[in-house]
């Protein structure tokens, strides 16, 4: 088994994830795994970094596929006995002009952004080694969507005692409410992406609390962040930040020094803790 530190970035064949891998290749003292659901796109991205003189390793990972997540888990367990840095970056967003029915957009978006991210956490968090770092890439869209929720929902999502099961129930209810076209009446905002990212931010707060309760002595730091508005296939060419600039806050959180005890359980943008 290798003692080399290891970092894993989900959805990193392009966009912000790719830029996070690039930065980690330069700054992380260990093996860096670029992961992609499509091995062809993943290997191409690894080759692109090689042209820049950077060495990333590749492992397949589709966060929608539990078997794929478990294959990565088993590989990390066997080869490294765990992992040191996990960046949950993979995500999707329908374009504003997309005419897919809202209920379908809600189901598909939540499936990857919330449920997929949660499944990766469920399988990989137990493997994170002491002094490890976990970064969940959320979005400022989570804050604005929170503001668009009913007072009752806002209170639940801001609660310091909400459980992961309660959060899963709420995310499931959103999808069900959209199918009945009842979501606005039930206090939800009209954004599937925003609600999926509420899920990611609140999940991060819950997971950080669980780490405090169950693994306090392990000094693991777990946070959610927004990369900013970044020029990628998701956000388009008019966005203000380059992918490398978008990677800055996630990479800052992934590389917090071993003696840091914060931020933890926070939502950050531009390397600054934001009020949730
Ligand atoms: P992007 O260019 O569309 O890249 C998304 C990445 O996620 C791609 O590598 C994609 O792989 C991967 N992915 C999607 N579904 C996946 C799955 N089921 N399993 C594994 N990988 C999957 O988007 P981006 O702008 O870099 O976004 C990265 C993250 O930042 C997302 O979580 C996004 O919500 C968040 N974010 C972005 C912005 C922005 O302005 N760009 C702002 C706030 C937050 P494929 O190539 O196979 O599709």
Image (tube, rainbow, N blue to C red):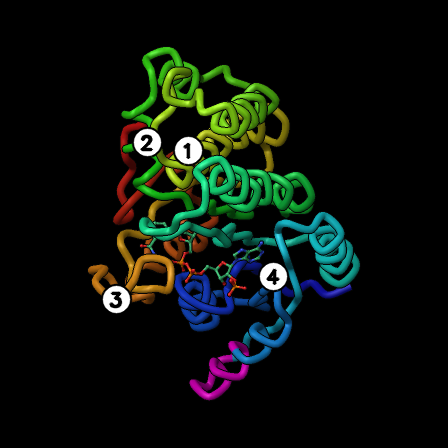
Instruction: Identify the residue position indicated by label 3 in the image.
Output: 237
Q: Secondary structure at mark 1?
A: helix
Query: What residue is rendered at 32% in x and 49% in y?
Result: 96
Q: How far, Cα to Cα, is label 1 from label 2? A: 6 Å
| Mark nearer the N terminus (4 vs 2) | 4
Query: What residue is rendered at 50% in x and 15% in y?
Result: 161
Q: Which residues are magenta?
A: 45-54
Residues at discs 1 and 2 in contact (Cβ within 8 Å): yes
Give neighbour class at mark 2: few <14, some 14-19, many 20+ (Cα, 10 Å): many
Q: Position of residue 25 (x, y in %)?
A: 48, 71
Residues at discs 3 and 4 in contact (Cβ within 8 Å): no
Residues at discs 4 and 2 in contact (Cβ within 8 Å): no
Which quarter of the rendering shows the C terminus?
Answer: top left
Asked whether residue 249 is drawn in magenta, I would say no
User: Quadrant of the rendered structure where residue 138 is?
Assistant: top left
**Vertical arrangement, residue 206 with respect to residue 73, above or below:** above
Residues at discs 3 and 1 in contact (Cβ within 8 Å): no
Near-viewer residue (121 or 188):
188
Give neighbour class at mark 4: few <14, some 14-19, many 20+ (Cα, 10 Å): many
Q: Which mark is residue 145?
A: 2
Q: How far, Cα to Cα, is label 3 from label 2? A: 24 Å
Q: Is mark 3 within 8 Å of ligand 1?
A: no
Q: How far, Cα to Cα, is label 3 from label 4? A: 32 Å
Near-viewer residue (34 or 171):
171
Q: Residue furthest top?
A: 152
Instruction: Identify the residue position indicated by label 1 in the image.
Output: 195
Give neighbour class at mark 3: few <14, some 14-19, many 20+ (Cα, 10 Å): few
């Amino acid at each position: 088994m290798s003692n080399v530190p290891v970092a894993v970035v989900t959805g990193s064949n392009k966009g912000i994830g790719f830029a996070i891998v690039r930065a980690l290749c330069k700054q992380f003292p260990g093996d860096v795994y670029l992961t992609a659901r499509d091995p062809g796109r993943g290997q191409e991205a690894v080759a692109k970094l090689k042209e820049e003189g950077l060495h990333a390793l590749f492992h397949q990972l589709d966060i929608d596929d539990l078997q794929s997540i478990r294959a990565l888990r088993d590989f990390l367990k066997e080869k490294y006995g765990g992992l040191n840095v996990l960046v949950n970056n993979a995500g999707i967003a329908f374009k504003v002009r997309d005419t897919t029915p809202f209920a379908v957009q809600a189901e598909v978006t939540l499936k990857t952004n919330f449920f997929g991210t949660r499944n990766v956490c469920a399988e990989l968090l137990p493997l994170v080694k002491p002094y490890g770092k976990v970064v969940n890439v959320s979005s400022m869209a989570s804050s604005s969507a929170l503001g668009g929720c009913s007072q009752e929902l806002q209170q639940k999502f801001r609660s310091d005692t909400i459980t992961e099961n309660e959060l899963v129930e709420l995310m499931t209810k959103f999808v069900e409410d959209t199918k009945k076209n009842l979501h606005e009446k039930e206090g939800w905002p009209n954004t599937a992406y925003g609600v999926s990212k509420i899920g990611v931010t609140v999940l991060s707060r819950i997971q950080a609390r669980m780490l405090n309760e169950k693994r306090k002595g392990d000094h693991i730091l777990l946070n959610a962040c927004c990369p900013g508005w970044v020029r990628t296939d998701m956000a388009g060419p008019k966005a203000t930040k380059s992918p490398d600039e978008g990677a800055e806050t996630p990479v800052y959180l992934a590389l917090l020094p071993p003696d840091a005890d914060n931020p933890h359980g926070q939502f950050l943008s531009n390397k600054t803790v934001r009020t949730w």
